[in-house]
Image (cartoon, rainbow, N blue to C red):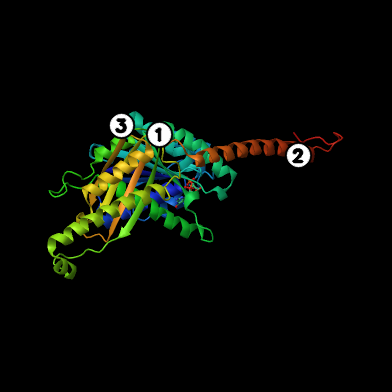
Amino acid sequence: MKLAMIGFGQAGGKIVDKFVEYDQRHGSGIVRAAVAVNTAKADLMGLEHIPDEQRVLIGQSRVKGHGVGADNELGAEIAEEDIDEVQGAIDAIPVHEVDAFLVVAGLGGGTGSGGAPVLAKHLKRIYTEPVYGLGVLPGSDEGGIYTLNAARSFQTFVREVDNLLVFDNDAWRKTGESVQGGYDEINDEIVRRFGILFGAGEVEAGQEVAESVVDSSEIINTLNSGGVSTVGYASEEVEEQQSGGLLSRLTGGEENDSLDTAHTTNRITSLVRKAALGRLTLPCEIEGAERALLVMAGPPRHLNRKGIERGRKWLEEQTGSMEVRGGDYPVTGSGFVAGVILLSGVTNVPRIKELQQVAIEAQDNIEEIREESEENLENLVDDGEDELESLF
Ligand code: GDP
């Protein structure tokens, strides 16, 4: 499906920048337009693939291009004040050609955390196309203020979008790696998963696979449940075996075909299990997910209806959902078969509860420390005997 992507803040900009690169490399046709919005000039300058004229610096009169620190209330205020500048960049997008908006941001910082929900609200008021969010949760080692920012932004962002797709940095961070190197890998993972998911709806249905190709309306219907979504992924290398090869000659063409079919089906069902039960973008209990979509991507001869149907049924059992859709994403010449599962409307998410708990503690601590510091400062400045007088 064709998306207008808007990256808000540093993480949002970098992720959208990577989507643009992925789109160019794979010709997947999912990024119809890309915009980056930031209060920090340096972050915008660091982007590589989003065109210059689609990079919007906001809040110049307030923060002079230096960013908002991790103050997401200021981020939200600036976004509201300068929404016309953002709209100016969106005006250049042929919105009638996009299926949906995707607003991307790291929720732990300031600019994206505060600005993304403001932009989502604005877009929903103006356009009829769905507005989705892609929100990145901070690692639990990032500290209290990031957790507090994320918890508050999450709550607001979910309310303002048609569906919030979540990626949890905490579930993906590796110890002993530089933050930058870590983010590069994490961003690759984000773009791979969502790239396949959204790319699935962009395939022109060819004759041999016409019936089972995923359509963008199926992605939209799955996301229509609203709420929070998570994405699972698993892949396996396959050899693009040429017909008439040694095995085929030894076993006879037909027999080889049926052997392949059973193998192909089993591979698909095992990939579906791995994708659903492995690491999700937002770890959660899949039981209770309101809707799901299974996308099997790979060379057409390695995909089959039976495997997808079995995988779909299994997902129905595991989630208890009555709305599990499934289909192909044929990618001729690819060396992999990959299963991507979108679980939409998930509600049993311990990580969010933990995030909120830590956020509340952080909020209380911040308040306590503030009061204490005020008192301490008073004690420091006060000479105790009221003997000194201020100048004015
Ligand atoms: P902002 O520019 O003020 O919106 O803040 P940032 O986007 O720099 O940071 C917000 C949060 O996003 C951080 O707390 C990190 O958890 C996360 N983050 C920052 N950069 C990246 C990135 O490149 N990839 C990912 N996945 N997360 C990032």
Considering the numbered disc 1 on the image, is that residue within a helix, a strand or a loop?
A: loop
- In contact (CB < 8 Å): disc 1 and disc 2: no
Q: Residue 380 appears in which quarter of the rendering?
A: top right
Label total for image: 3
What residue is pinned by disc 3? 127
Q: Nearer the viewer, residue 114 or 391?
A: 114
Give me the residue at 13% from left, 63% from top. Answer: 253
From this view, report whether residue 357 is shown above or below residue 267: above
Q: Amino acid at mark 1?
A: Gly
| Circle 1 or circle 3, nearest the eye | 1
Is residue 1 visible in the rendered image? The answer is no
Give me the residue at 41% from left, 38% from top. Answer: 287
What residue is pinned by disc 2? 376
Whole-Å distance between the Cαs marked 2 and 3? 52 Å
Q: Residue furthest top?
A: 125
- Quadrant in the picture for the N terminus: top left
Q: Nearer the viewer, residue 377 or 120?
A: 120
Q: Is residue 136 left or right of residue 334?
A: right
What residue is pinned by disc 1? 227
| Circle 1 or circle 2, nearest the eye | 1
Residue 341's disc is none
Q: Residue 314 appears in which quarter of the rendering?
A: top left
Local packing at callout 1 (Cα closer than 10 Å; few below 14, some 14-19, many 20+) is some
Q: Nearer the viewer, residue 104 or 342?
A: 342
